[in-house]
Image (cartoon, grey):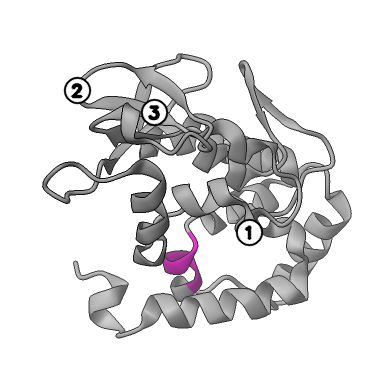
Amino acid sequence: MGTWDSIVPGARAEGHEQYKVWLNAVGSCFSPFFPSQQVLRFGPWSSWTTEGLYLGLKLLVIGDCSLIDPLVEFELFRRGVPSLVHVPAVMAARDDLVHQGAFQLLKSGRKYNAIRNRCFGRLNRGEANWAWSGTWRHPILNVPVPREQFERDVFGPALFLSLSQHGTEVARLKAFWGNGQHRISDKMRLAHGHLRYVEEYVRQA
């Protein structure tokens, strides 16, 4: 089965535009960037936003930790060659998450590679000193886990906890869906994976 990218050119971009309109109509609390009324706690770690929790426990592969800019606050999760590190400082951000330096270090996308190369350094041959590990630090088990497990054990429950603080908005969205309004499109799901958790929570509410 082809992906939406192969079926509909620019589907992600179109889905993102649809998502922005949808979010404006139903409420910003359905975004993982929206700060929770109460801090989200998982084991010894906590975050004001679901996105902060997702990014703050993402593990990066670092070839040489001595090349990391001294201003970057990181935690060494596994020492070695290479090492696994994460940057938990992003979890402390309550507002304006996207403009935090730690966010730009951790958010995937080529436009942030220059910032990552500057902060994490380059090896002698000019190669980047960093790479995505494809794993996250599980806050309870304290072991690296793949994204699917992290989303199931941490991200999804964190988003549910955040949405539980917005009963009025959740009830209103459920009523909209009952009237056939403000549905989540396939393109929106492709562009924003957290929407499947929003759908699950609202339908169960």
Taking the magenta stretch, the answer to whether it contains residue 43 is: no
Left or right of 57? Residue 113 is left
Three-letter amino acid code of the residue under disc 2? Val
Query: Which is nearer the N-term, disc 3 or disc 1?
Result: 3
- Secondary structure type for disc 2: loop
Residue that carries the numbered disc 2 in the rendered image: 81
x and y, in percent, of residue 9 in the image: 30, 85
Report the residue at 19% width, 42% height from top: 123
Helix, strand or loop at mark 1: helix
Q: In front here: 82 or 21?
A: 82
Does residue 191 show up magenta in the picture? yes
Q: Residue at x 70, y 69 (%)?
A: 177
| Left or right: 100, with 178 as reference point | left
Q: Badge 2 local density, few (<14 within 10 Å), some, or many (20+)?
A: few
The structure residue drawn at horizontal position 76% and vertical position 76%, both measured from the top left corner, is: 25
Q: CA distance from mark 2 to mark 1?
A: 31 Å
The location of residue 7, given as percent across then percent down, is: 26, 81
Tell me the kind of residue under disc 1. His
Q: Which quarter of the figure has residue 129?
A: top left
Q: Start and end of the magenta stretch?
A: 188-192
Q: Position of residue 13 (x, y in %)?
A: 44, 79
Kindly identify the amino acid type of the residue bearing the numbered disc 3.
Answer: Val
Q: What is the secondary structure assignment of the residue under circle 3?
A: strand
Q: Residue at x 60, y 43 (%)?
A: 52
Callout 3: few (<14), some (14-19), or many (20+) C-alpha neighbours within 10 Å? many
How far is the residue under mark 3 from the one under mark 1?
22 Å
Q: Which residue is mark 1?
A: 99
The vertical placement of 54 against 34, above or below, is: above
In the drawing, does residue 16 fall left or right of residue 121? right
Name the spot of residue 54 as percent of width and height, x first: 52, 41
Q: Which residue is mark 3?
A: 85
What is the distance, in whole Å, between disc 3 and disc 2 at their CAs? 12 Å
